[in-house]
Image (cartoon, grey):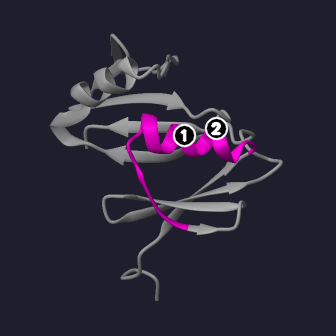
Amino acid sequence: MLANKDVAANIPVKDMAKAKKFYEDTLGLKEVGRFGDEVVTFRSGKSDILVYRSEFAGTNKATAMTWTLGDDIDKTVKELKSKGVSFEHYDMPGLKLDGDVYVGDGMKVAWFKDPDGNTLCVVSG
């Protein structure tokens, strides 16, 4: 029923102006739609990210969104760090921390947060 349909990520935020600046300027995403001042849609590859105003922004304690980067992960982490992004460090059994990137089992992964505390992730694949 849904296997061949596109899906979009939904990210709650409290401050739309701050979120818009982060998703556009820091992450380099392009705005492709808007519903008043309450919802902004960004494009990432062939996927959409709906950033919407919510009083519950930042309350999710798990990863909200992940980008699969392949071999570009180290370069991307370095670029994000140069734009002021701070990476999260967790206790990750079986993975070794190399700078801000966890390495193990043939993959690399790093986590960071948006201005509202939503946890975002980049992974090698």
- What residue range appears in magenta? 14-33
Q: Residue at x 75, y 40 (%)?
A: 59
In the current view of this chain or complex, which residue is farthest to the right?
A: 55
Above or below, comparing residue 54 to residue 38 in the picture:
above
Residue 80, position as x, y percentages in the image: 37, 26
- Binning the other alpha carbons within 10 Å of mark 1 as few (below 14), some (14 to 19) or many (20 upward) gives some
Outermost residue, bottom direction? 1
Q: Quadrant of residue 119?
A: top right
Left or right for 111, reference 94: right
Q: 104 and 115: which one is in front?
A: 115
Q: Quadrant of residue 101?
A: top left
Q: Amino acid at mark 2?
A: Lys
Location of residue 28 in the rendering, given as x and y in whole percent from the top left corner: 38, 43
Q: Residue at x 39, y 64 (%)?
A: 47
Between residues 58 and 14, which one lies in front from this camera angle? 14
Query: Given the image, on which type of amino acid does mark 1 rest?
Result: Lys
Per the image, the residue denoted by label 1 is 21
What residue sits 33% from the left and 10% below the top? 99
